[in-house]
Image: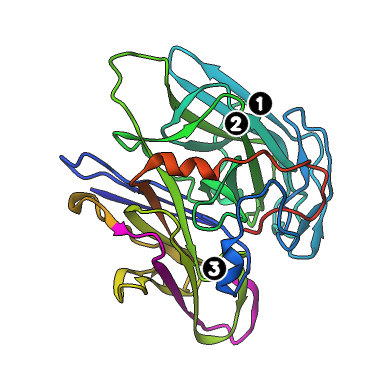
Amino acid sequence: MKRTFTICGAILLAAVTAGAPFEASLAARGKPIEAQGEQEKPAAPTHDMEQMHHGGSADSSGAQKTRFMQGGMHHAVAKGVKLDAKVDAAAHTVTLRVGPMNLPAHTSHMKMPQPPDLVWDVPIDGWLLAYHPKLVDAGGNAVPGTVLHHVAFWNENRADFLCPNKEEHIFGAGSEMTDWAEMPGYGYRVEKGTKIRVETMMYNSTATSYDKAYLEVVIPFQEVSGDANAAPRKNVYPAWMDVKSCGGSSYDLPPGKSEKTGSVTVKYEGVLLGVGGHMHDYGRQIVLQDASRKETVATLGAKSDAQGHLESVPVKLFVQEGGYKFAKGDVLKVSATYDNPTGKLLREGAMGIAVGYFAASDDAKMAALRRNPRMSHDMAGMSHDH
């Protein structure tokens, strides 16, 4: 059985196949640099000035430190939103809770007051194994996932292995509220004190208002010093291959048929375990190619409803073949095709991302991605687009 998850600004690959030793899972993001040379910059603790900040920043107490800014457009900042983290040592889970958030009916994400970015200090030394998101009200009753525009987790202590000008994007979810399933034998390595920035955006296109809503994400973990009988984990790294290369993922969607292409250069030898895709409404197809080998890695046709609203993008796995091998220096090309029937230019209306999990041939070399957290959270306008 295969499960395909699509989320706004991020995607997850999770496939469950009987008898397979690995079931892939994942998430997405970005910012422009059309020139290939720009993406070769080494990891740095500061942010690219062109990156767009989502909601300012705050520490886990909710103290506001910056103004909200996305793509040059300012939003009101939701007040009183905090991040609470509770560890269940017996169950080996941590539950992150963002809220409370008031969500008035018929309010777009541009008009909705947005939570500030919040920072979670990881309390364990080990691996994060899965992510289980849900929305609830103050009484614990379910709130529909349609009010979540997206949530994204960024590791401030590590750079992206394809685009080192970015933080590493480790999890994301959108309106589908899909689970990120555990990958047997694999995990995302963290150390105690690792800083994970939690970026949340809400909207509410429904006729119902929701007061004091909370986003909860349950994260199973395995500690390095835990059960001696626990199976060892191999480290995986999220791989984002974006039509905007190492830049912001959103771009204007022209009317009619269109195609946009970008490229990134592989900096470490290893294998791609699986790949899925993220698009927006009216998306038709994502194609990932290894331009250096002149090979098509995956062609992912999007599924939409009769109105062109995106429903899903498929996942292609390479696990049974031992992964799709990437050599250092390989140039990966990703293309996204759309067919916009509205007759209008849709501002920031498109994304085109192929995303998967990467396992390095020599994991020790990935230590070069380690960096100090960005200098401060009070640098307005310096973050990521969605």
User: In the picture shown, does residue 325 fall above or below 197?
Assistant: below
Q: Which mark is residue 245?
A: 3
Identify whether 20 is placed above or below 140.
below
Question: Which numbered disc, 3 or 2, marks the residue that appears first in the sequence?
Answer: 2
Q: Nearer the viewer, residue 11 or 362?
A: 362
Q: How many marks?
A: 3
For the residue pair 106 and 254, the one nearer the viewer reads as: 254
Q: Earlier in the sequence, mark 1 or mark 2?
A: 1
Counting from the top left corner in percent of width and height, residue 12 is at: 43, 50
> Which residue type carries mark 1?
Asp
Residue 269 is left or right of residue 380, and the answer is left
Residue 316 in view of the camera:
no
Which secondary structure dominates the residues rendered in magenta?
strand
The label number, if any, that marks residue 194 in the structure image = 2
Please name which of the two marks, 1 or 2, marks the residue nearer to the observer.
2
Estimate the x, y position of residue 7 in percent, counting from the top left: 50, 54
Q: Position of residue 249 (x, y in %)?
A: 58, 65
